[in-house]
Amino acid sequence: MTTKTKQKNTKDAPSEVDAFIQEVQGENPARTGEDLPTVRFERDELHTMTVTEWNAFEGQYGPSVCVIGEDDEGTRIKTFFGGFEREAFLRFAEGQEFPVQVRLVRKLMDSEQNPGRSYAALFIKADV
């Protein structure tokens, strides 16, 4: 018993592949934050931004959140929060309507439960 394999028409294959890729790209636009500059807000400074959207995900170092918005000059940016900063952002985001202008401070805090250790904290508030 012999089996026949469907021969590829190499002449049509690239055009079919290209057409399929164009179709998929048209239905699934590029992710919004991929081409944005990443800003790492310095600790112990007051920062302002307008948060337009956010996305929680499982990152390389554990659960994280990507926050996308605009800085004071109107430039679209993204930043990331993990650990306790992530938890603080998620508590803040509950019930918020976006976009929202915020003020935030990142601070290294001394642990009360584990003397000699510290953790990163995020203080964030809607600027109404």
Image (tube, grey):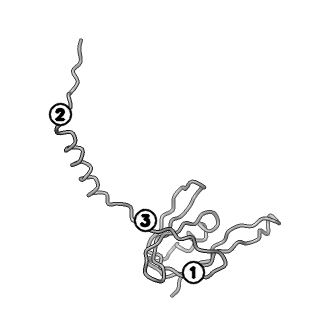
Residue drawn at (52%, 73%), measured in percent from left and top?
Answer: 93
Where in the figure is residue 41, as x and y percent of width and height?
Answer: 58, 73
Residue drawn at (57%, 58%), measured in percent from left and top?
Answer: 63
The amino acid type, in three-letter code, at marker 2 is Asn
Q: Mark 3: which secondary structure?
A: loop
**Callout 1 crowding tier (Cα within 10 Å): few <14, some 14–19, many ≥20:** some
Residue 74 position (above or below residue 6): below
Q: Is residue 37 left or right of residue 91?
A: left
Residue 47's label in the rendered image is 1
Q: Can you identify the residue that label 2 sits on? A: 9
* Nearest to N terminus: mark 1 or mark 3: 3
* Nearest to N terminus: mark 2 or mark 1: 2
Disc 1/disc 3 C-alpha distance (Å): 20 Å
* Nearest to N terminus: mark 3 or mark 2: 2
The amino acid type, in three-letter code, at marker 3 is Gly
Q: Residue furthest right?
A: 115
Residue 5 position (above or below residue 29): above
Disc 3/disc 2 C-alpha distance (Å): 39 Å
Q: Can you identify the residue that label 3 sits on? A: 33
